[in-house]
Image (spheres, grey):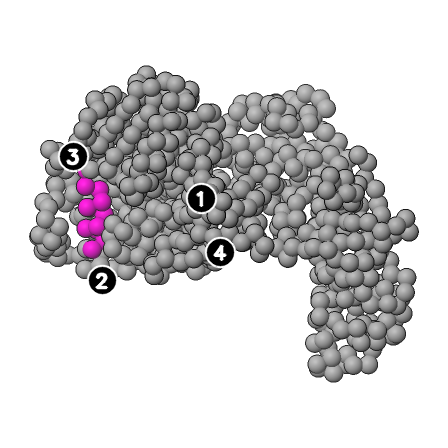
Amino acid sequence: MAQEIVEGRVRRIVWQSDEDRYFIFRLSSPTGEFSAKGTIPAGDLIEGLAVKLKGEWKTHPRYGRSFAFTRFSLAKAKTPEGLVRVLQAGIKGIGPVTARKMIDFFGMDLTTVLTKTPERLLEMPGFQSTAGRRKYQRIVDKWQGFRGELQACSFLMGHGLGAATTKKVYARFGDETVKLVKENPYVLLDVSGIGFILADKIAFALDTPPDAPWRIEAAIYHVLNRWGAQNGHLFLTRDELFDRITKITKLGVRNFGRPLLDTEVHETCQRMSQDKYRPRFCQLHMEKDRIYTRARYWYEQKSADRLAEMMWMDQASPASDTMIDNFIVDYEASEGIELSEKQRLGLLQAMSHKVMLLTGLPGTGKTTLLKAVMQLFELAQTNVALLAPTGIAAKRMSQITGRPAMTIHRALQYKGDSWGRHSDNQLPVEAVIMDESSMVDQEVLYRLLEALPTHCRLLIVGDPDQLPSVGPGNVLHQLIDSQEIPHVHLVDIFRQAEASDIVTNAHRITNGLMPDLVDGRGRDFHFLQMEDEDKILAYILKAAARFKERGKNFHVISPMHGGEIGVTALNEALKEELNPDDGDKSEAKVGKFKEFRQGDRIMVTVNNYDLEVFNGDMSEIEWIDGKAKRLAFYIDVEQGRKLVTLTFTQANDMLKLAFCTTIHKMQGLEADVILMPFTTAFGIMLQRNLLYTAVTRAKKKVFIFGEWRAIRKAVNTQRVQTRNTRFAERLSMAVMAIGQLDAPMEGMR
């Protein structure tokens, strides 16, 4: 349906949402009175205000005909009273008396004065004094802010952007928004939440030619930045990039109007690699046939340089040999254990080396050694910080050590688009222990290293057999492969006779051996052979209901989202089984495709440092207030339990059902009991590291419902996707370079 433009005066406001600024109001126009509804991005909507709307007519079976607008603007005021309302809509807090005085002085051209020559307001009596000048500045700032935001947001919303995304765009570009987007719509790629497809739709609406140079440049950046990240790559080769560019139209993107040439794409990359190229965020870095975004090259190279600097800086051990020997005796006595030779070696190396790697499989004493290192640092009066990549991993680290731990993002004061800790404002620490390092991507490592003083010690702890990070890079494996960092890898199971089936089977899986699938009482690794997906679903629902009734700490995981026994389907089925609608529970739709019920199990998917909730936090919805459009849930914090309240918009952006999650999402998290379907229907997801990660999420029992051949396929499939990274090589070169620089200095000493 074609869009129309209507004008009229606001007669009455029927409903409004302060959360997302969605309004329903009655509008009086020359053709009659009708309802209008839509989002007003800025200013106040007041009765009597003359407005101009662009949108289309909609008919609701219950509420009848209304005008749904996508663009909102103020109509030109024709009377002094109309202009008063315009001022009150745009300048929050201005009274009618002040507004009329300004109109009396400047007439109906007042808005032009405010916009183009605001300094003329100082001609008015009352604005010359100190207090008057402050009042003048407030009026000008509010008007120009309102006008710029309204113009920019109405423009963007008129081209299909939602209100929340529009706000982010305006926050990024300010009053330059319309100008910049019209010049090059692909500057929108610099805003979180906007990808190439959405920016391309706006470009198409603005008549951008399909083969415009800036469109090809944006497509190149999109493939490197978005597709590369989704596959864990820091760079793409020339051939890989060209292959993906030619396939981009399969993602719903309009074609380029003609075939692109490999040489054309390569020459465009060379142009984008120049320092003078704009927009700056799209700049690239090229090395032979390897092509990086400039940012990802920086993360990789500077991580290597920084690690090399830390490793080469001379620094005495914080603990003497005597202190270490005495500590080992006391620690073994207090813990009731005897450290292995490798654990003793790890403890010594953590004290004698600036940077060290500690890796190991479940049950090999990795946690024991981590605790020992931390306590020895404390004994040596070394200020140590405990960090992990996710909130749930940090909480687990804190539980294990009995000391406060936090996420890397929180420690570095990450605020969504900025990092408070960096090279000019480093962390006041002398040592850092970073756990779950297999989940750390290249940018996070770079941000951490930049924020650490050169004298700081760093112990990197992880399990290389787990799944790699979601973000690009392969940090832990590359650190190991470089062979530049002292590395202690624990493989021997402590107290072999007491080892659980989970631990022994995890070791078998990672060594390419089939787990022991013999079921029986007293065992903690259970496999139930079945192929029918309906039967698998029924067993999982029955088991989940039983464990809930018994008050057990259990969780359901699945290899992928789709399918009859994927995460999405299991979540819906488990919700009805474990938290059915009994008529007393409140429920609400918080987004177009998301609905929650009181008692639903949920997971936080976005870090929010103001609310102290973190990606991976899980809870149950405590209450839902449909009228106030809010819901609440409890989370565990250092001080105990905290009630977190979210608006529906926040809930839509930050929460998802978590009766079941993917194995990837469960990484860093544990439960006493794990329930999991595992069949050949999961196809390419059946890989050794995925099965290993799934099994090691269980602390006491794991139940696998599925096919023996799916287990066999996963164990035999070590098809770990190669990630394009040169971090190991760069680290070796950086260490060599510093060694060469240091050699002449040694001769002068």
Residue 32, x across and y down, in percent: 88, 50
| Residue in the foreground of this view, choosing between 559 and 26 | 26
Q: Which residue is mark 4?
A: 645
Q: Is residue 476 above or below residue 248?
A: below
* Residue extending farthest bottom: 129
Q: Earlier in the sequence, mark 4 or mark 3?
A: 3
- The quarter of the rendered structure image containing the C terminus is bottom left
Q: Residue at x 64, y 34 (%)?
A: 197
- Amino acid type of the residue tagged 1 in the rendering: Asp
Measure how far apart labels 4 and 3 are at the Cα level.
43 Å
Q: Residues within 10 Å of mark 2 (few under 14, many from 20)?
A: few
Q: Which residue is mark 1?
A: 600
Circle nearer the viewer, 1 or 2: 1
Q: Earlier in the sequence, mark 1 or mark 4?
A: 1
Residue 477, x across and y down, in percent: 34, 34
Q: Which contiguous range is marked in magenta?
A: 364-375
Magenta-colored stretch includes residue 373: yes
Q: Which residue is mark 2?
A: 381
Residue 146, x across and y down, in percent: 72, 60
Magenta-colored stretch includes residue 680: no
Residue 572, x across and y down, in percent: 47, 34
Q: Is residue 504 above or below residue 35?
A: above
Q: Earlier in the sequence, mark 3 or mark 1?
A: 3
Contact check, label 1 and label 2, Cβ < 8 Å: no
